[in-house]
Image: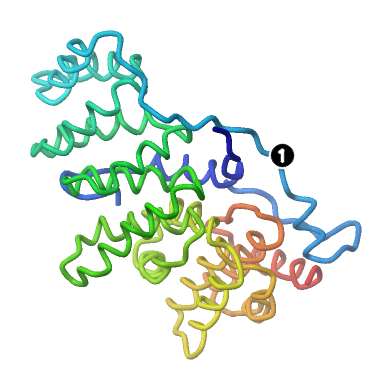
């Protein structure tokens, strides 16, 4: 079965997020470019956005995990990875498991769900990240209802890195189960479920992602930005723009960060006024929101005040 892959931008941001991911036991994982001077053809923002679209490649989604050449060897290597009495032992086991590829994933997931040692869980996750990719989302979705919260959380988080609308029902089912638990839901699993749901096109967990964007953007911004692209559209835009009413500085920044990923052109009038804001963080947030909505470009980071002012002027000219 074939389907379309996520945009190159989403894959880039997901890769950035994965590179900075630092997992812990029993909890889920918690490019700068020059600003455009203007649309040389003098077109509308919609036309500019259309010109930015990149060709997509096909992904073949697996319907079952590959069989290992030798199951006993895989199980032995996982044991060595978990025990890791020496650094060399851990490196050797990791290299062997990564060389074996996707065939190791079911065994790694099973062991991760049972493992209680923090270091071992971290090593297992690192190999799982290496051995899973966009072709595996349909298989990872089967783990959304696993008995282990650790396994469920990882499967949701990892699937979010490869937007796949076909797993939306499974993602929303997982979200609904957790939402029903209220305050009893594990925060990391709830976050991972919101991330996964958004990546499939659902706005079910948008509030959780907004809160994360406001509190933990430095740690999670890359993966949030990549995931919410799946939910980009009028519904998500209306929710986020509505939060600007009476918003303080932190709320404004969070909204602009979210709109950069999930906003559409209807948000641009609300964003435009923040291009003149005296707070450089808000100004940069507005620039990044424009970049995401109009050009589907990743956010700029730590833009100096003078450069931000000049970039904001160019965006005002385009809008």
Q: Give how far across and how far down residue 214 sits, in percent.
A: 39, 69
Q: Is residue 236 above or below residue 10?
A: below
Q: Residue furthest bottom?
A: 246
Q: Is residue 258 above or below residue 121?
A: below
Work out whether residue 225 or residue 216 is closer to the camera in this orientation and state it: 225
Q: Give how far across and how far down residue 229 sits, in percent.
A: 55, 56
Q: Residue at x 80, y 51 (%)?
A: 51
Q: Is residue 120 above or below residue 160?
A: above
Q: Residue at x 40, y 53 (%)?
A: 196
Q: Residue at x 52, y 83 (%)?
A: 242
The quadrant in which the N terminus is found is top right
Work out whether residue 183 or residue 70 is closer to the camera in this orientation and state it: 70
Q: Give how far across and how far down residue 280 sits, in percent.
A: 55, 71
**Dot 1 crowding, Cα within 10 Å, few <14, some 14–19, many 20+:** few
List the residue tagged with mark 1.
Answer: 55
The quadrant in which the C terminus is found is bottom right
Could you tell whether 297 is left or right of 169 in the image?
right
Could you tell whether 304 is left or right of 173 in the image?
right
Q: Give how far across and how far down residue 270 sits, in percent.
A: 64, 81
Could you tell whether 283 is left or right of 161 in the image?
right
Q: Is residue 250 above or below residue 204?
A: below
Q: Residue furthest right?
A: 41
Q: Quarter of the image holding residue 54?
A: top right
Assign a secondary structure to mark 1.
Answer: loop
């Amino acid at each position: 079965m074939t389907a379309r892959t996520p945009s190159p931008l989403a894959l880039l941001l997901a890769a950035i997020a994965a590179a900075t991911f630092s997992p812990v036991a029993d909890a889920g994982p918690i490019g700068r470019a020059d600003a455009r001077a203007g649309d040389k053809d003098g077109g509308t923002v919609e036309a500019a956005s259309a010109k930015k679209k990149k060709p997509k490649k096909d992904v073949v989604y697996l319907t079952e995990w590959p069989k290992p050449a030798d199951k006993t060897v895989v199980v032995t290597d996982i044991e060595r990875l978990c025990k890791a009495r020496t650094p060399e032992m851990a490196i050797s086991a990791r290299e062997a498991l990564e060389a074996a590829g996707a065939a190791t994933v079911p065994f790694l997931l099973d062991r991760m769900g049972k493992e209680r040692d923090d270091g071992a869980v971290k090593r297992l996750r690192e190999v799982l990240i290496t051995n899973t990719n966009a072709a595996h989302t349909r298989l990872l979705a089967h783990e959304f209802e696993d008995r282990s919260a650790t396994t469920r959380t990882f499967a949701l988080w990892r699937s979010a890195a490869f937007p796949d609308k076909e797993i939306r029902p499974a993602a929303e089912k997982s979200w609904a189960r957790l939402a029903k638990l209220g305050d009893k839901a594990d925060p990391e699993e709830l976050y991972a479920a919101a991330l996964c749901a958004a990546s499939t096109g659902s706005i079910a967990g948008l509030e959780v992602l907004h809160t994360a964007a406001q509190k933990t953007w430095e740690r999670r911004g890359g993966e949030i930005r990549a995931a919410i692209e799946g939910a980009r559209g009028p519904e998500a835009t209306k929710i986020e723009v509505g939060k600007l009413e009476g918003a303080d500085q932190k709320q404004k920044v969070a909204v602009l960060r979210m709109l950069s990923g999930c906003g559409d052109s209807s948000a641009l009038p609300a964003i435009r006024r923040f291009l003149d804001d005296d707070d450089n963080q808000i100004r940069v947030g507005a620039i990044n929101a424009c970049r995401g909505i109009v050009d589907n470009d990743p956010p700029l980071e730590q833009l100096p005040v003078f450069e931000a002012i000049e970039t904001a002027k160019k965006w005002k000219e385009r809008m």
